[in-house]
C-alpha cells in the first residue's frame, strides 16, 4: 500500500461517531457509522440495506469477503444514493453518501453502489496501473451478484451490459495499462471480466467460470493488503484449470483488441431494442449466459 492510500485510510478512520451499530453478517463483523441526522426508522432501513447488499456479495463469493469492515454512511442533501469509496487496511472502510430523503425503494430496490463497494473487499488492493481490474470486477460482479440473489431480473443486467459496454473502448484505446479513461477503467474492466467468464466456460465445457476464479482469489487474498497482480491472476487460473485470466491480460494490457459487441450479444442471445432486452435461449452461447447468472 502506498503512502497516499495509508493517509486516506487513516483519514477515513478518524473522527468516527461515538455511537455505532455493530453486527455480524455471514460470520463477519460490520461496524456501521451514520454521520448526520437520521431517525430510528431510517437507521433500521440503512441496516437492512447493508444486510441485503452483503447477502448478494456473500452469495457470489461463498462468504463475506473480509472478517471485519467499517461502513460509514454520510447523510447529505438529496433523495438518492451518492458516490462511494473503499479504503484498504487492516479493517477496510467503505464510505457512501446517502440523501436524507432517500426512500426504501431507492436503497432496497434500485441501489447498486453498496454492493459495488463491498465487492472491492474481495480483491487485493492494487496499484493504479491495475485499477481497471478492480473497478471492472466491481461493475461486472455487482450486476451478476444481484441477479443471482434475485434482486434484479436477469434481463435487466444484460440490458445494462448491452448499454454500458459500448463505452468500454474509446477510440484512443491502446490497452488497459496505457489508456486510463473512465470508460476503459470501469466498462473496459467489466468487458474484460465478461470475455474471461465466457472463455473460461468455453474451455471447461461450462463447468467453471469467473466466479470460481474470484472465489479462489478471495479465499487467499483480499482488500486488506496489496498483492502482486500476475500472481493474483494465477490463483484464479489454478482454480479453473485454464490460463484465461493470465493470457487475456497479456493480450490486452498494452494492445488494442477489437471486440464485435453486436456479434457477441447475438451469440449470447441478448437482443436489445430501444431500452428493453429479450433473451433467446436457443442462441449458441445461451447456456453460458444462463450459467453466468444462474
Image (cartoon, rainbow, N blue to C red):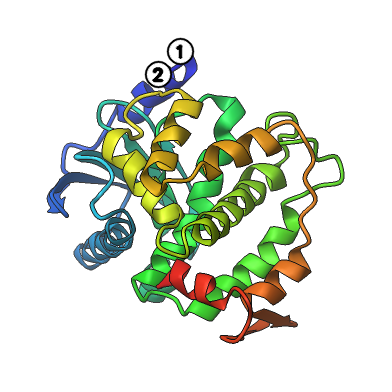
In this rendering, position of residue 182 left or right of residue 127: right
In the foreground, 289 or 31: 289
Give the numbered dot on residue 262.
none
Element type where label 1 sits in the image? helix
Quadrant containing the N terminus is top left
Q: Residue at x 41, y 58 (%)?
A: 208
Mark 2, Cα crowd under 10 Å, few <14 / some 14-19 / many 20+, is some
The answer to whether residue 112 of the structure is visible from this angle is: no
Give the numbered dot on residue 3.
1
* Numbered circles on residues, count: 2
Q: Position of residue 27 (x, y in %)?
A: 13, 50
The answer to whether residue 163 of the structure is visible from this angle is: yes
Q: Residue at x 32, y 33 (%)?
A: 221
In this rendering, position of residue 85 left or right of residue 269: left
Residue highlighted by disc 2: 6
Q: Residue at x 47, y 35 (%)?
A: 233
Q: In whole angstroms, how far apart are the C-alphas of marks 1 and 2? A: 5 Å
Amino acid at each position: 500500500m502506498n503512502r497516499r492510500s495509508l493517509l486516506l485510510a487513516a483519514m477515513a478512520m478518524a473522527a468516527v461517531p461515538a455511537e455505532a451499530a455493530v453486527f455480524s453478517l455471514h460470520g463477519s463483523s460490520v461496524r456501521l457509522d451514520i454521520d448526520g441526522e437520521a431517525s430510528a426508522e431510517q437507521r433500521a432501513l440503512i441496516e437492512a440495506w447493508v444486510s441485503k447488499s452483503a447477502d448478494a456479495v456473500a452469495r457470489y463469493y461463498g462468504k463475506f469477503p473480509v472478517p471485519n469492515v467499517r461502513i460509514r454512511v454520510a447523510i447529505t442533501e438529496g433523495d438518492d444514493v451518492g458516490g462511494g469509496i473503499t479504503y484498504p487496511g487492516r479493517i477496510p472502510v467503505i464510505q457512501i453518501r446517502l440523501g436524507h430523503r432517500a426512500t426504501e425503494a431507492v436503497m432496497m430496490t434500485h441501489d447498486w453502489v453498496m454492493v459495488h463497494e463491498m465487492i472491492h473487499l474481495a480483491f487485493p488492493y492494487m496499484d493504479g496501473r491495475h485499477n481497471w481490474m478492480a473497478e471492472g470486477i466491481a461493475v461486472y460482479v455487482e450486476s451478476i451478484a444481484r441477479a443471482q440473489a434475485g434482486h434484479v431480473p436477469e434481463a435487466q443486467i444484460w440490458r445494462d451490459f448491452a448499454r454500458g459496454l459500448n463505452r468500454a473502448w474509446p477510440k484512443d484505446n491502446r490497452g488497459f495499462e496505457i489508456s486510463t479513461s473512465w470508460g476503459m477503467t470501469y466498462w473496459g474492466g467489466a468487458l474484460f471480466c465478461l470475455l474471461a467468464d465466457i472463455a473460461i466456460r468455453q474451455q471447461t465445457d461450462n463447468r467453471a467460470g469467473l466466479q470460481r476464479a474470484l472465489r479462489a482469489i478471495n479465499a487467499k487474498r483480499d482488500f486488506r493488503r496489496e498483492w502482486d497482480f500476475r500472481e493474483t491472476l494465477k490463483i484464479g487460473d489454478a482454480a479453473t484449470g485454464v490460463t484465461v485470466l493470465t493470457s487475456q491480460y497479456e493480450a490486452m494490457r498494452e494492445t488494442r483488441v477489437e471486440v464485435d459487441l453486436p456479434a457477441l450479444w447475438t451469440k449470447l442471445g441478448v437482443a436489445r431494442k430501444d431500452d428493453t432486452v429479450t433473451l433467446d435461449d436457443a442462441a449458441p452461447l445461451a447456456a453460458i449466459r444462463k450459467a453466468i447468472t444462474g
